[in-house]
């Protein structure tokens, strides 16, 4: 992304002709308009990368959630979104008894889960079968805007794997904007500052190199 | 004011030295509040308004929710110190009405179907009032909504026209509003030209109304440019803050 990235606001005309479109744009009378405030990206398909907004879960997203409640058949999970998610007892790897649900995942636990399905009325179901199931214990939880997550992960995971390597921490990034960092206290602080840096400077060029420099300078 | 003692015009200019088709000076700043999802501070002549947007978020109380789309709530409130004589705090007939019409003016651009079962809350606080606060509130609210990352089909822009001394003019100031013959606030979507709010206080002939609408549409186009600039400037300031 170059430094002079074009900012668009809702209703801005992007193209007089219909194009292949992605997110953040709409077509009206054959013309393409932006519908969110963000950065215009015209690489392969026209889209607008939002600068703000709430996380809306989508199928197959990996998220970090906090268990808020347990009812007779599922765990209620807060996923930093206007919508609460549920993890049904049947999605737990292995058979467990209803009465023993709170022995496996307790209220307040941090879990890594995958969005199994988002229903018509935004009923969000989670699963933990596919990825290696994990309750995150210890470590530090940082909440960032979900709009910065793709930048934090980088192309093919380049940014996040670099931060992990340079700061010697284990880091987990959820699509919903929760970042979990674990390691030695001073390393965690370093990684956290690197994450903050990526969030702040998400839309500038040469960011990966600057983050490397920053991490090396502060090691 | 035809008795010749008081007049709204002097040498063809208005009380504050404006031409008939001229807006009062505007200042718009986006993203001024840290805790809100989106915010905007706006000064329009003597008006000072602050708008904050929260959401989409869970609806409380629960029974208000809609299963197919988001609900938009808009609260217009005047601070007790916003007028000469202390205003009794709290909602009254006037502010409830303004909240309703402003909400309807904004609602039509929001892509509500994207966020079923949620609420988008807009709070507009008038810190200082000087005629045309509902228009200023709508202008601030639409910048704040964009700043909150809420998908919209376009921004909503609003300004008023009116009639003083038998002449149709753009953007009334306080004296013109209080002693003039008509005041017509208009809200529109500049991109499409759709009118999303129009109210009229006073009397106008049809021709005067048509003339005034032309003025108001031109006024909205000018304000729209400033709204755009405010949002673009916000991003540039964010970039600068890093270096």
Image (cartoon, rainbow, N blue to C red):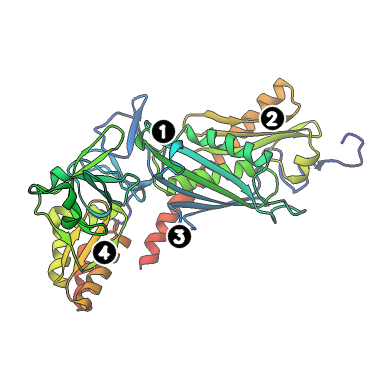
Give the farthest residue toward the top: B206
Which is nearer the eye, B70 or A27?
B70
Relative height, residue B3 to residue B85 (above, below) = above
Do the CB atoms of the residues marked 1 and 4 lie less than 8 Å apart?
no
The residue labelled by disc 3 is B34
Q: Secondary structure at mark 2?
A: loop
- Label 1 or label 4, whichever lies nearer to me, is 1
Do the CB atoms of the residues marked 1 and 3 lie less than 8 Å apart?
no
In the picture, the disc for residue B200 is 2
Would you call the spot at circle 4 few (<14 residues within 10 Å), some (14-19), or many (20 or more)?
some
**Chain bearing mark 2:** B
Do the CB atoms of the residues marked 3 and 2 lie less than 8 Å apart?
no
In the picture, the disc for residue A165 is none
Q: Secondary structure at mark 3?
A: loop
Quadrant showing the C terminus of chain A = bottom left
**Chain bearing mark 1:** B
Report the Cα–Cα distance between label 2 and label 4.
54 Å
The residue labelled by disc 1 is B66
Do the CB atoms of the residues marked 1 and 2 lie less than 8 Å apart?
no
Q: Is residue B155 visible?
A: no
Do the CB atoms of the residues marked 3 and 4 lie less than 8 Å apart?
no
**Label 1 vs 3, first from the N-terminus:** 3
In the picture, the disc for residue A141 is 4
Which is nearer the eye, B190 or B14?
B190
Q: Is residue B233 visible?
A: yes
Rendered location of residue B83, percent (x, y): 73, 52
Rendered location of residue B219, percent (x, y): 60, 38
């Amino acid at each position: 992304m170059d430094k002079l990235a074009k900012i668009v606001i809702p209703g801005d005309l992007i193209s007089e002709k219909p194009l292949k479109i992605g997110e953040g744009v709409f077509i009206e009378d054959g013309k393409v308009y932006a519908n969110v405030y963000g950065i215009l990206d015209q690489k392969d398909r026209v889209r607008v990368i939002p600068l703000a907004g709430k996380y809306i879960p989508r199928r197959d997203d990996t998220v970090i959630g906090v268990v808020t409640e347990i009812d007779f058949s599922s765990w209620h999970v807060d996923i930093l979104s206007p919508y609460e998610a549920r993890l049904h007892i049947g999605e737990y790897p292995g058979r467990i008894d209803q009465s023993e649900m709170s022995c496996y995942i307790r209220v307040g636990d941090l879990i890594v889960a995958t969005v199994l399905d988002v229903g018509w009325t935004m009923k969000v179901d989670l699963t933990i079968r596919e990825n290696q199931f994990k309750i995150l214990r210890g470590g530090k939880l940082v909440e960032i805007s979900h709009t910065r997550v793709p930048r934090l992960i980088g192309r093919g995971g380049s940014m996040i794997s670099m931060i992990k390597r340079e700061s010697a921490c284990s880091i987990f990034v959820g699509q919903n904007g929760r970042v979990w960092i674990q390691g030695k206290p001073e390393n965690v602080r370093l990684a956290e500052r690197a994450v903050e840096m990526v969030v702040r400077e998400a839309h500038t060029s040469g960011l990966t190199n600057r983050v490397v420099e920053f991490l090396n300078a502060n090691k | 004011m035809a008795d010749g003692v008081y007049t709204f015009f002097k040498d063809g200019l208005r009380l504050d030295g404006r031409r008939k088709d001229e807006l009062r000076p505007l200042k718009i700043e986006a993203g001024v509040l840290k805790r809100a999802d989106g915010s905007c501070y706006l000064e329009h002549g003597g008006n000072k308004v602050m708008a904050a947007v929260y959401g989409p978020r869970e609806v409380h109380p629960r029974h208000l929710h809609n299963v197919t789309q988001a609900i938009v709530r808009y609260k217009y409130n005047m601070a007790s110190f916003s007028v000469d004589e202390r205003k009794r705090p709290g909602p009254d007939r006037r502010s409830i009405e303004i909240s309703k019409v402003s909400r309807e003016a904004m609602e039509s651009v929001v892509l509500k179907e994207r966020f079923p079962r949620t609420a988008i809350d807009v709070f507009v606080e008038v810190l200082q009032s000087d005629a045309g606060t509902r228009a200023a509130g709508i202008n601030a609210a639409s910048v704040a909504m964009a700043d909150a990352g809420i998908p919209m089909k376009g921004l909503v822009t609003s300004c008023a026209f009116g009639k003083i001394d038998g002449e149709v003019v753009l953007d009334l100031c306080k004296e013109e509003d209080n002693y003039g013959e008509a005041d017509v606030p208009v809200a529109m979507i500049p991109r499409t030209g759709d009118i999303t709010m129009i109210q009229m206080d006073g009397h106008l002939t049809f021709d005067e109304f048509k003339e005034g609408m032309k003025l108001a549409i031109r006024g909205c186009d000018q304000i729209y440019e400033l709204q755009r600039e405010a949002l673009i400037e916000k991003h540039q300031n964010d970039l600068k803050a890093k270096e």
